[in-house]
């Protein structure tokens, strides 16, 4: 399959372009997504496909998602954009009580095949109301699928799968990864099935389980641990719902230690569920308790020096991995 080096932004743009080309039912809607104002993954698409398929909307997140649900019920495949993830709360009723429930409340006769793209601005000094990482909210909602890619290849493949999935999908992008470059298959038929984790680095001593931007912190931590003689495996979840528990459990079973890493707040975050699964499935096999490294339980500060203390870092991940090794030495 032919590949081309491109950024995450370009990979997402290609996925949207190819979906619009492949199926007339696909349409995009959101704030400032049409030319000439579009500068992100939707740039150029309204010029190519027209403003009836790439629709600039009023500034109303509830209206954007509500219109997408209505269009989906009518047979369309809408891709709605919520510009910043912090604003998704305004559309929460539409997502939680309508999109996620349609299949169940109609006995399977009606679904809501919408994709909601949204971006996390954490790490850019945007402050407490413009930098939250809220995917844990939607993991808790039966009927929603939650996707967080870390590489351009995964971004294209997972977005394509989400657009053509028959259930509502929340597709979480990270602004700090939009310029990340990597090889991407350019074949329009390329997609990545939802619910399949990817092992980004193999190892034997400890499993570092992550997703999205923090995958790169986990990889950097694995490199530092290698210098200390510790072999760390890095598992990229890619989708949180459906969760590939089998790959996570098998990795931790091989290494006998696990550290879960994410930019979402650690308290009540996705790592809590993953840690619970590992402790339940591998009770008696793990040689140390599962460690978690997440954002600290504070509103995010705008000052760069303070914000840097909130999110996971390679140093914090290395320290957590070393604690699993120290527990082994003391109690093993």
Image: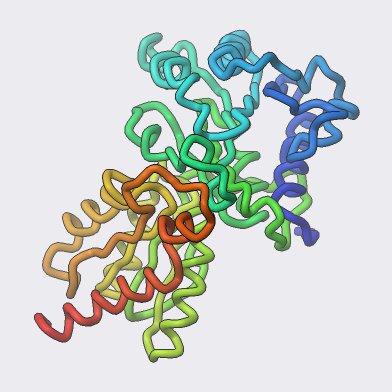
Q: Residue at the spot x=86%, y=34% of the render?
A: 44
Q: Residue at the spot x=39%, y=51% of the render?
A: 244
135 to 76, vertically: above or below: below
Quarter of the image with the N terminus is bottom right
Q: Nearer the viewer, residue 158 or 140?
A: 140
Q: Residue at the spot x=53%, y=34% of the render?
A: 85
**Which image quadrant is residue 97 in?**
top left
| Colouring convention used in this rendered image of the protein | rainbow
Q: Residue at the spot x=38%, y=67% of the render?
A: 208
Let me know if residue 108 appears in the view. no
**Which image quadrant is residue 33 in?**
top right
Count of residue discs: 0
The percent position of residue 187, horizontal first and vertical second, equals: 77, 49
191 to 57, vertically: above or below: below
The percent position of residue 50, horizontal first and vertical second, equals: 86, 20
The percent position of residue 297, horizontal first and vertical second, equals: 32, 48
Q: Nearer the viewer, residue 240 or 259?
A: 259
> With 239 as the anchor, is 330 left or right in this view?
left
The percent position of residue 32, horizontal first and vertical second, equals: 74, 26
């Amino acid at each position: 399959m032919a590949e081309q080096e491109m950024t995450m932004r370009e990979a997402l743009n290609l996925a949207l372009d190819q979906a619009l080309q492949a199926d007339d039912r696909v349409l995009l809607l959101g704030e400032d997504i049409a030319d000439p104002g579009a500068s992100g993954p939707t740039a150029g698409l309204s010029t190519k496909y027209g403003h009836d398929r790439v629709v600039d909307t009023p500034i109303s997140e509830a209206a954007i998602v509500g219109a997408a649900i209505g269009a989906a019920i009518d047979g369309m495949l809408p891709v709605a954009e919520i510009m910043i993830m912090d604003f998704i709360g305004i559309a929460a009723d539409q997502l939680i009580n309508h999109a996620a429930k349609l299949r169940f409340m109609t006995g399977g006769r009606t679904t809501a095949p919408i994709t909601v793209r949204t971006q996390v601005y954490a790490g850019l000094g945007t402050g407490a109301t413009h930098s939250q990482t809220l995917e844990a909210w939607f993991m808790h909602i039966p009927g929603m699928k939650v996707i967080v890619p870390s590489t351009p290849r995964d971004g294209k493949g997972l977005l394509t799968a989400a657009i053509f999935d028959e259930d509502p999908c929340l597709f979480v992008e990270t602004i700090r990864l939009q310029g990340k470059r990597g090889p991407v298959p350019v074949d329009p038929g390329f997609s990545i099935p939802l619910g399949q984790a990817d092992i980004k680095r193999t190892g034997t001593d400890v499993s570092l389980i992550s997703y999205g931007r923090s995958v790169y912190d986990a990889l950097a931590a694995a490199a530092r641990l290698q210098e200390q003689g510790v072999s760390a495996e890095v598992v990229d979840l890619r989708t949180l719902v459906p969760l590939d528990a089998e790959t996570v459990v098998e990795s931790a079973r091989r290494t006998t230690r696990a550290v879960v890493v994410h930019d979402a707040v650690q308290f009540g975050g996705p790592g809590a569920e993953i840690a619970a699964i590992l402790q339940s499935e591998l009770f008696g096999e793990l040689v140390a308790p599962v460690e978690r490294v997440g954002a600290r339980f504070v509103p995010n500060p705008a000052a760069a020096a303070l914000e840097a203390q909130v999110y996971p870092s390679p140093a914090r991940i290395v320290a957590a991995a070393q604690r699993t090794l120290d527990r082994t030495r003391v109690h093993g």
